Amino acid sequence: MAENLKECKVACLATFDQLEVVCREEWVKCQELGVNKNNLCDYEVEYLCNYKRNFMTDGKRQETQDLYLVKWKGYPESMNSWEPQQNLKCTDLLNQFWEDLMREMVRLKKRNVPKKLDASIVSNLVQRAKLRQTLKLWENHLNSLGSDKGRIYVENLVDMEGPPKNFTYITDYKVGDGISLNEVAVGCECTDCLNSPLEGCCAGASQHKFAYNDSGQVRIRPGLPIYECNRRCSCGPDCPNRVVQRGIQYSLCIFRTDNGRGWGVRTMERIRKNTFVMEYVGEIITTEEAERRGHVYDKEGATYLFDLDYVDDEYTVDAAHYGNISHFVNHSCDPNLQVYNVFIENLDERLPRIAFFATRAIKQGEELTFDYNMRIDPVDAESTKMDSNFSLTGLPGSPKKRMRVECKCGVPTCRKYLF
């Protein structure tokens, strides 16, 4: 029996930070945790917990001294200590502490910072500092999962909500039971897909138009499909017909909204019109399974079901529990993102990839949105089959979402309700 347990492993219930605290308390060196003889007695500020101003009298002269209660990295809270500001070399943490404190003063409608902070204020400041650490760990985790050029940031300045529970961040589709993605069997022989396509390159072989210009901007109308080059093509990774497959190119921030819309996404840099922004990624499930889940999501008041109905309404992407950054993108009645159906390694028209492109130039710091109830007017026979289905079911949760949801997008053209 014992020999069968040789490779058995049990997950540690303590975090690395907690283990580091134990090592320092017990004066134990640990190479894996970075605790060695050179830094065993080092004191690094983890965050600031409290503030007070002391008044000292020296004869006829009165002096003030600003003191901060410091949480030391790698040490338990029982070893927190009051330190004068001149001893602290953590400018960023000091600035962050005062930003949090002033935000608390505004929330409490107080004009001046007291000489000694109330216990409730201190509690909120500590919670805020711990939340920032938690979100930073999640941010690092998200960025470790993919190789996208753009970086993901996470910020919550509104409430104490941490990373979403029961949600796993993925960078590619998770295929459900009974569904298979058939890899494309052929590729193009082009050496210059944009300027000298052979037999129309991948798009032409599928009797469709080349989707991009030489800057990687989409130049076909919404409703028309995009056929990108694939791994069997002769062209290289720099081919202008490889845009969506290169991943997210812009740095984006998942942030907590201040008007009850939960999390949202904003761009950290300017995005050009008609450029690719992100894919809608999640679990690919059958419409029957989506219908079953839809009833559950109705009761929860939220859904992330996006029907793949370019030809037939057979499959749905569910990003409720498995998804990428698109999981956090909110609705707007005047959106800056537009959906396109994209085919790359899989040419099954029932299973397109869902890609978001910018409908206009998007400013740095602007929130990214798409219309949950978008409708595309048919412009030619080629796109009609997509439009008729897309307008009915090609959006998260409709028609599976039966309850009427109030819209909070706030734009002048708001329709007041999502569905």
Image (cartoon, helix red, strand yellow):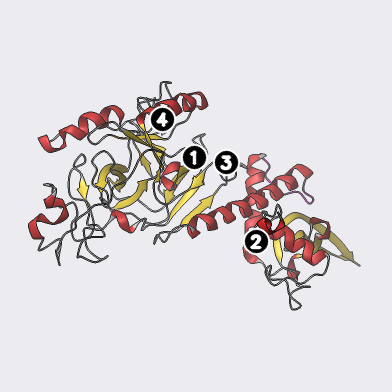
Instruction: Report the amino acid beneath label 3.
Output: Lys
| Secondary structure at numbered mark 3 | loop
Label at residue 321: 1
**Residue at image location 12% in from the left, 51% down from the top:** 205
What kind of secondary structure does the magenta stretch mostly adopt? loop
Distance between the alpha carbons at the discs numbered 3 and 1: 9 Å
Q: Residues within 10 Å of mark 4 (few under 14, many from 20)?
A: some
**Residue at image location 22% in from the left, 63% down from the top:** 239
- Dot 4 or dot 3: first in sequence order is 3
Label at residue 289: 4
- Dot 3 or dot 1: first in sequence order is 3
Q: Residues within 10 Å of mark 2 (few under 14, many from 20)?
A: some
**Residue range highlighted in magenta:** 109-117
Q: Quadrant of residue 197?
A: bottom left
Distance between the alpha carbons at the discs numbered 4 and 2: 48 Å
Q: Are marks 4 and 2 in contact (CB under 8 Å)?
A: no
Q: Are marks 1 and 4 in contact (CB under 8 Å)?
A: no
- Dot 1 or dot 4: first in sequence order is 4
The residue furthest bottom is 38
| Pointer 2 residue | 93
Q: Nearer the viewer, mark 4 or mark 2?
A: 4
| Secondary structure at numbered mark 4 | helix
Q: Are marks 4 and 3 in contact (CB under 8 Å)?
A: no
- Dot 3 or dot 2: first in sequence order is 2
| Pointer 3 residue | 165
- Expressed as whole percent of the image width and height from the top left, the position of residue 159 reads 60, 41
Q: Are marks 3 and 1 in contact (CB under 8 Å)?
A: no
Distance between the alpha carbons at the discs numbered 1 and 4: 14 Å
- Viewer can see residue 294: yes
Instruction: Report the amino acid beneath label 4.
Output: Glu
Instruction: Check the picture and name the quadrant holding the N terminus.
Output: bottom right
